Image (cartoon, rainbow, N blue to C red):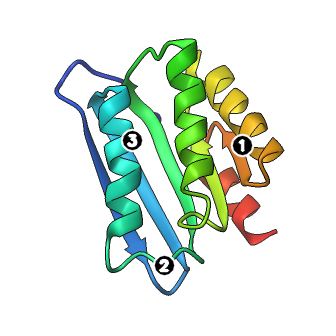
């Protein structure tokens, strides 16, 4: 099932699966740079989250068009929080956001993080097992 972005007020939700050592973050609606950074901090500070868990960030249903500076700042926030997000991070998205997710992935990798962009969750889940 492919999700479509919409114009509703944006929200990030997350589900922590201890058995899989995985956190699924889902963004929906109209989000912003500030709400994106807030979501990162909320997850990192959640008592149920373990930095040794992998993270899948599903952004297929968001409505957000970040500036180049915001893309770099998102990457900088990820790198700053590297100790909180120590395992793999998969960014699942589509359309023009795929190029931006790939840019964030590559720049994060240069900083020693394991981040990759995908167009579907199943492929992201398989990558997590490698």
Image coordinates of residue 58 in percent, x first then y, are: 47, 44
- Identified at 61% across, 59% down, the residue is 82
Give the class, few, some or many, for how many residues have Cα within 10 Å of label 1's Cα (few <14, many ≥20): many
Task: Answer left or right for 10 relative to 52.
Answer: left
Q: How many marks?
A: 3
- The answer to whether residue 30 is above or below residue 81 is above
Image coordinates of residue 87 in percent, x first then y, are: 66, 67
* Precedes in sequence: disc 3 or disc 1: 3
Which residue, as the protein is rendered here, is positioned at the far left? 9
Do residues under tags 3 and 1 come within 8 Å of each other at their CB atoms? Answer: no
**Residue that mark 3 sits on:** 37
Query: Is residue 3 visible to the viewer in this orientation of the structure?
Result: no
Give the class, few, some or many, for how many residues have Cα within 10 Å of label 2's Cα (few <14, many ≥20): many
Measured in 3D between alpha carbons, the distance from the residue under mark 3 to the one under mark 1, in whole angstroms, is 15 Å
Q: Which label belongs to residue 50?
A: 2
* Precedes in sequence: disc 3 or disc 2: 3
């Amino acid at each position: 099932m492919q999700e479509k972005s919409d114009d509703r007020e944006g929200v990030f939700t997350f589900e922590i699966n201890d058995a899989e050592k995985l956190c699924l973050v889902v963004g929906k609606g109209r989000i912003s740079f500030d709400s994106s950074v807030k979501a990162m901090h909320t997850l990192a500070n959640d008592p149920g989250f373990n930095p040794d868990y992998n993270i899948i960030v599903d952004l297929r249903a968001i409505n957000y068009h970040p500036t180049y500076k915001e893309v770099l700042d998102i990457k900088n926030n990820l790198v700053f929080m590297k100790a909180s997000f120590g395992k793999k991070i998969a960014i699942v998205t589509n359309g023009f956001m795929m190029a931006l997710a790939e840019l964030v992935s590559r720049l994060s990798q240069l900083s020693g993080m394991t981040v990759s962009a995908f167009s579907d969750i199943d492929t992201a889940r398989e990558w997590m097992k490698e």
